[in-house]
Amino acid sequence: MIREVYITETNCITPLGFDVESNVEAILRGDSGIQLHNDISLMPNSFYAAIISNEKINSTFEKISTDTKYSRLEKMMILALEPIIKNSKVELNSKTAFILSTTKGNVTALKEDSEESFNNAHLDVLAKNVADFFGFKTQPIVVSNACVSGILAVSVAKRMIQSELYDNIFVVAGDEVSEFVLSGFNAFQAMSDLPCKPYSKNRTGVSLGEATTAVLLSAEAKNAKIKVIGDSSINDANHISGPSRTGEGLFRSIQNALKEAQIDPDKIDFISAHGTATPFNDEMEAIALNRLALQNVPINSLKGFYGHTLGASGLLETVIGIESVNQSMLFESKGFDEIGVSESINVIDKNEERNIDYFLKTASGFGGCNTAVIFEKMKHELH
């Protein structure tokens, strides 16, 4: 019998709030974290992005530590993890792992030309700094695979628990809006001149954002918020930044995840998609979903609330998706106006009460990577 895997604790640090509850309240109100920014240290001209106030990060961090050696991203990651490590009362022993998931990590360290800064930009150093803050006994594991990193870390954790290597795994995912990331997306001409509008006819590209998110995956069903029942990652090996036009990698990832979960596509009640609002991503997702007969399933992209938070996006959107299930509420896909993809999909245009038993989370990223994970609502039997 393969072990069952649950997510028992969740937390997130975003421009909309520093816990899950405040984020859900902001989404229900329709508040977006995407604002117009004029910050020449990040970009010469003004741009739309979802950025967390430094003041709030620092003042909140000071409540848990007076140590000044941590970078901004490290503080954000520690803040995401701290309450869930404390609440869970899980012992940080040899059966408890720590996975850190990010696309760019401490890339901002490279601004300073010194050996120490260069060293700090390494992802293993970032992971060790965060792990040591809490005193994990196991070697930290880094998952860095472009924009699927956050949700891929859930797959990796699930498989490690199923293989009985660990009983509990804390996962943190995070990225920040930096000059490096902004200039990269700007060079692709992929940045939107307005807050992004996934799947919409009038979309003009990506809005970037930043966040950190933390979850605890466990073999223990006690306090479980949701069960993880299927996962798959397939690379379509198409192009360094463009996905397969037929959605092949995403199609196969979802197909495999459904097979492992042992459910038919018509059992999926809701899809939390990647939805970056670029022409290639949105189109490819619509094609892949149609190939699987999932075109009528309610779907949202949370990018209109958070922007594209890179490696954090898949985990952040999973955490909000878990709230959808447990509050029986479909959250709107903010910014959506009229359908702008060639195949029909059922984009959620307003918050709606709905019973959700199964939800699918997808993500796709540079290099052709695609990940799909299926979650099942906990049936709490009445004793």
Image (cartoon, rainbow, N blue to C red):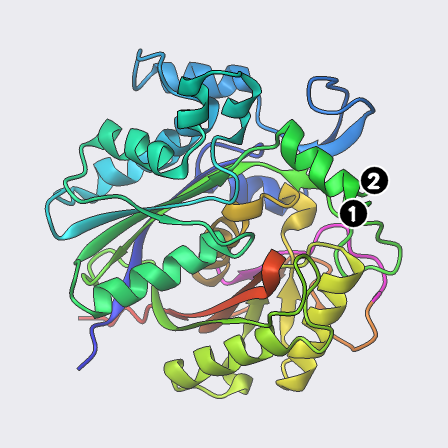
Residue 299 located left or right of residue 311 = right
Between 238 and 265, the one lying in front of the other is: 238
What secondary structure prevails in the magenta region?
A: loop
Badge 1: residue crowd in 10 Å (few <14, some 14–19, many ≥20): some
Residue 47 point in image, percent of width and height: 78, 30
Vertical comparison of 113 with 33: above or below: above
Q: Is residue 133 visible?
A: yes
Between 325 and 45, the one lying in front of the other is: 45
User: Mark 1 = which residue?
Assistant: 190
- Which residue is located at x 48 percent, y 30 percent? 106
Residue 3: name its quadrant.
bottom left
Vertical comparison of 345 with 65: above or below: below
Residue 164 located left or right of residue 200 = left
Asked if the magenta segment contains residue 339, the reply would be yes
Residue 36: name its quadrant.
top right
Residue type at mark 2: give it: Leu
- Which residue is located at x 65 percent, y 44 percent? 305
Q: Is residue 356 visible?
A: no
- Dot 1 falls on a residue whose secondary structure is loop
Vertical comparison of 247 with 102: above or below: below
Residue located farthest toward the right when viewing the structure as drawn? 202
Residue 314 point in image, percent of width and height: 51, 54
Residue 179, disc:
none
Residue type at mark 1: give it: Ala
Residue 53 point in image, percent of width and height: 57, 21
How many numbered marks have been drawn onto this rendered protein structure? Answer: 2
Vertical comparison of 161 with 254: above or below: above
User: Mark 2 = which residue?
Assistant: 194
Badge 2: residue crowd in 10 Å (few <14, some 14–19, many ≥20): some
Tell me which segment is drawn in magenta: 327-340
